[in-house]
Each structure stands twice: as C-alpha cells, then as structure tokens.
Image (cartoon, grey):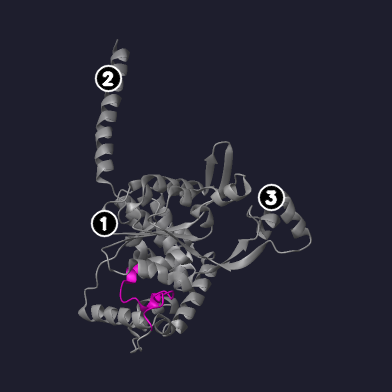
Amino acid sequence: MSQPRSRLLDLLLQAPAVKIKQLPDADLGLSVEEPFPFLAIVGQEEMKLALLLALINPKVGGVLLLGPRGTAKTTAVRGLTDLLPTVRRSLCSHGCTEILAEEEGLAAICTACAEKYGYRQPLTIEDRVRMLELPLNARLEDVVGGINERVALEQQRVRLERGILGHADGQILYIDEVNLLEDAITDAILDAAAQGFYTVRRGPLRLRYRARFMLIGSMNPEEGRLRPQIMDRFGLRVLVKGLCVAEDRYRAYQNALNYQRNPTQFASLYAHETLQLASDLQAARERLERVYVGDAARNLGLTLIQSLAIDSNRADMTLFEAARAHAAADEREEVTTSDVQAVSLLALRLRQSEMLTRYFAEQGHEDERVAQLTADFLAKGEAD
C-alpha cells in the first residue's frame, strides 16, 4: 500500500492552479506590484518542485531554469515572494549571533556584541529571506560596490560601499537571462559564490564584505550558451518546456487574463493555499536537520553518479541534499530511493562533458605510453 503524500506535495501537484473566477476589469493605468501567485501557475511541476526544494534546503546549490520565452520561468521565481522562509538574522555588520557566542565563546564576536550579550540583549532578529533581482543592465560597480559618489561630492571624502552582492548576503539572488551577463560581472559572481565574500579595492582603499547567497537563474538556450564555470554553480537544472495539453494552455491563458484585469483580487483567490504552503515550507526547513540518507538511497545515488561518469563532487552534494529536502517536504526523516528518484533528473542533468571524456581518454593513452617506456627501461636495466 503506497504512503499518502504530504500536504505540501499535494498543494504543489494538485488543484490550486485551476481556481479561476471571472474578475471585473481593473484600472490598467496603475502599475502592477502584486506578483503572480506561485500556485496559479499551470503545470510545470518540475520547475515548481525545484524552486521549493531550494527554499527548503539552500545547500542544493540554487536553481537554473532553461527554456524558451513565455514559459513562466520569471513568473515562477517572482511568485516565490510570499513563500520565502524566515531566518534568524544578525543585527551586527560582523555577523555576530547568540549561537556563535555560545559555541565559540565571546572571543568569536565583536566587542559591542559581547557587551550586548552580557546584558542579555538580542544579537539577532527573526526576518524573512528577501529576493534581490540583478538587472541585466547593471554595471560592475552596482554589482560589487565601489565609491559612494554622493558622499564624495557632498562631504569631500571617499567611502567604499558594498554592491548588490553584499546586499544579497543571506538572501536569494535572481538573475534573468543569466547567459547574457557581461563576463566581468559573471566573474565577480563566481568569485563571491566560491568564497562566500568579496573584496573591493579602489586605490589604497579596501572593503571586504560577506556574500553568501542562493543563486537562481533563468535563460533561453536560443540566445546563447552559459559559461561552464557559472553553470557549475547551479545545483538543480530544470528544462522548462511549453504546456502540451490543450486544456492546460487555455487555463494558463485564463489565469494570465484574470491577473491582468485585477492582480490584487486574483492573488487573493490563492491567499489561503499560499499561507498554508508557506507554513508547510517552514515546517519542512525545521524538519530538515533531522533527515538522514538511508543506505538504499545512498547506494542508488552513488550508482547513478558513477554510471554517468560525473566528475564533479557538487553532483553528490546536490543529489543527496535535494533528496533530503524532498523527504522533509514529505514529512519523513529518512531519505528513500523514491526521494533520490524524484530529484535525480534535476540534480544530474547537464553534468556530463563529451570534451572532458575525450580529453581524459587521450591523456590516458599518453599515460600508458609513459608507463610502458618506464617499465621497458627498468626491465632492460635489470637484464643488463
């Protein structure tokens, strides 16, 4: 007898996207600020699952959405706004927390926070994770930071300030058309993602800030390929295709039309399910630390990775962390083979390289030649 799905997975896979009502026309002269409800997106279960797994467990390494224009990639990401979890955030620019003081002692936090901790004043506050969107036309200075021009002009002094990467610390950084970024900006993002911090230098001035963020990207493969270096920074890779069922396409059209007529009223139709899903996501995040990988799931995951000849160890991290998130979403504490199966395509696709396979094969022939020559020389010396 199959085990029933959790409420979270049921919300993801069933009916909220079909909730359509006829709405009155709104004043279209007003700007639209209400995001399209995540649960109102028709179909695209793989995309929605990947995004929710990333919210439950940031260790999956972010999400990359690949597909043609008009398949709700950006809409889905922006629709996560009402589902973002809450976390304990440091009130100090140095990142001091109560846990850091308890585990490593007062020497691990700054003097000001050590004094506050002694007086039992809070070092952190509960806050909602935010999503920052990197504009495609952003300058390198906007992304990494630099000299505050206003302060320089008004106060005649130079002060360095962090950029978007610094403000994205502990948040989600979303990049639409990620394959069209300038190389210099891409390099900066890679640097920050690899180290967890970024250093800005302007002459003798130096500013180092933390930049630990979850990366979500979307792109249209028709407009150019993504550099392998940044592709490797995305844990889950989703192929977003157009809806195949005629009824689904018409339902998507109706939802889009009703949203355009009155975004606020349309979003209110999904308010109850959205709050329920946000609550379940938070519960899954709290459950995650108790979730462990079972032996059968471990063996299946390692067999898949080895059979596909995937070299990067990031594949292992993504596969098992995504499987843990899936088990947490399904209200279980043991990862089973069903969890690995559910996330295997998301975690393992686009990780093979024909060029590297050929390169290592050619290098193997050279290595064999060197080893054989060495053996022949030693054998000849022993014979003499």
Q: Which residue lies furthest to the top in this view?
A: 384
Quarter placement of the N terminus: bottom left
Q: Can residue 84 be seen in this view?
A: yes
Task: Give the structural element (helix, strand or loop) at label 1.
Answer: helix
Residue range (magenta): 27-47
For residue 221, the mark is: 1
Residue bearing the label numbered 3: 108
The quadrant where residue 178 appears: bottom left
Residue at 26%, 29% in the rendered image = 366
Amino acid type at image mark 1: Pro
x and y, in percent, of residue 341 in the image: 34, 65
x and y, in percent, of residue 122 in the image: 70, 64
x and y, in percent, of residue 344 in the image: 34, 61
Q: Which of labels 3 and 2 is toward the front? A: 3
Query: Which badge, 1 or 3, is on the more N-terminal residue?
Result: 3
Residue bearing the label numbered 2: 376
